[in-house]
Image: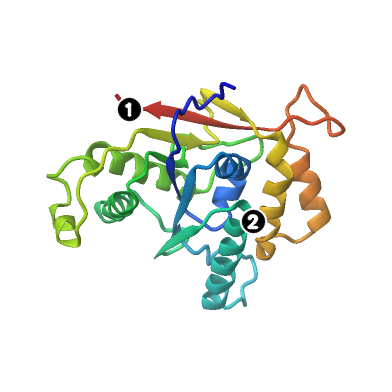
């Protein structure tokens, strides 16, 4: 059976996002789809999401540990084996040579066929919402790392001392893009996505309301009784 991805072999796929819960929110059902199809998935998160609370009295270091644990549990729910944290400060990500080098390092370490990240141009993801600046920054960081740096030996030459050599990424997928050009039907994995999201309990105030909202994200031409769920991406296949 033909599938939209069109892959003829198993892929190594690296998701690079800003915070714990970003992979699940942006493309958790797709991750489960890919895991079920036998692809190898890894996560890299630039922060531990320690500003993910409105409680002024919360202990930041404790919240880091909580969110790190929650992310490992969510990844386990989807079948993702490896999760790496880079421990940049939450809310302070900017495209810089330092963050670009970190992205180049992890991409060369993992040597993925496919990289998935956020779309830096998605300022307003849906009505009444502004996209988090870290979500946009990580997209720009990863894009700038992939081209021109990851595959070029003259960028970050010091990484050779770490045994990291240039690597060619085959595809870049930008999740939740307003300029999406590929949509995946992930209906059969939507409840698993919800289960993974529920592992991020520190971010959920009302579980029933949260589940209802996520289940309500079916396509406009379907219903809650007979839903169709999609996750969309902008896909760049490098020549």
Residue 52 visible, this orientation: no
Closest to the camera, between mark 1 and mark 2, is: 2
Q: Quadrant of residue 51?
A: bottom right
- Name the quarter where the N terminus is drawn: top right
- Which sits in the foreground, 208 or 153? 153
- Secondary structure found at label 2: helix
Residue 194 horizontal/vertical position (percent) = 71, 49
To which residue does mark 1 refer?
A: 238
Disc number for residue 2: none
The residue where tag 2 is placed is 77
- Give the mark nearer the N terminus: 1 vs 2: 2
Q: Distance between the residues labelled 1 and 2?
A: 31 Å
Which colour scheme appears in the figure?
rainbow
Left or right of 93: which side holds 158? left
Q: Residues within 10 Å of mark 1 (few under 14, many from 20)?
A: few
> On screen, 193 above or below 222?
below
């Amino acid at each position: 059976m033909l599938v939209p991805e069109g892959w003829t072999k198993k892929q190594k796929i690296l998701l690079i996002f800003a915070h714990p819960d970003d992979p699940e929110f942006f493309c958790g059902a797709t991750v489960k789809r890919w895991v079920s199809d036998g692809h190898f998935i890894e996560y890299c998160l630039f922060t531990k999401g320690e500003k993910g609370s409105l409680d002024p009295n919360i202990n930041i270091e404790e919240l880091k540990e909580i969110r790190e644990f929650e992310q490992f549990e969510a990844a386990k729910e989807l079948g993702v084996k490896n999760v790496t944290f880079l421990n940049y400060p939450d809310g302070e990500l900017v495209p810089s040579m330092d963050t670009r080098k970190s992205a180049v390092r992890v991409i060369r370490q993992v040597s993925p066929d496919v990289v998935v990240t956020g779309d830096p141009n998605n300022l307003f993801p849906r009505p009444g919402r502004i996209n988090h600046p870290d979500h946009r920054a990580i997209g720009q960081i990863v894009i700038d790392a992939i081209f021109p740096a990851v595959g070029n030996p003259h960028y970050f030459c010091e990484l050779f001392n770490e045994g990291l050599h240039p690597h060619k990424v085959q595809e870049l997928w930008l999740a939740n893009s307003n300029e999406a050009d590929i949509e995946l039907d992930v209906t059969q994995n939507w409840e698993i996505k919800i289960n993974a999201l529920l592992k991020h309990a520190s971010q959920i105030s009302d579980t029933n309301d949260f589940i209802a909202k996520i289940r309500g994200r079916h396509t406009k031409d379907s219903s809650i009784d007979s839903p169709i769920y999609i996750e969309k991406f902008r896909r760049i296949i490098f020549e």
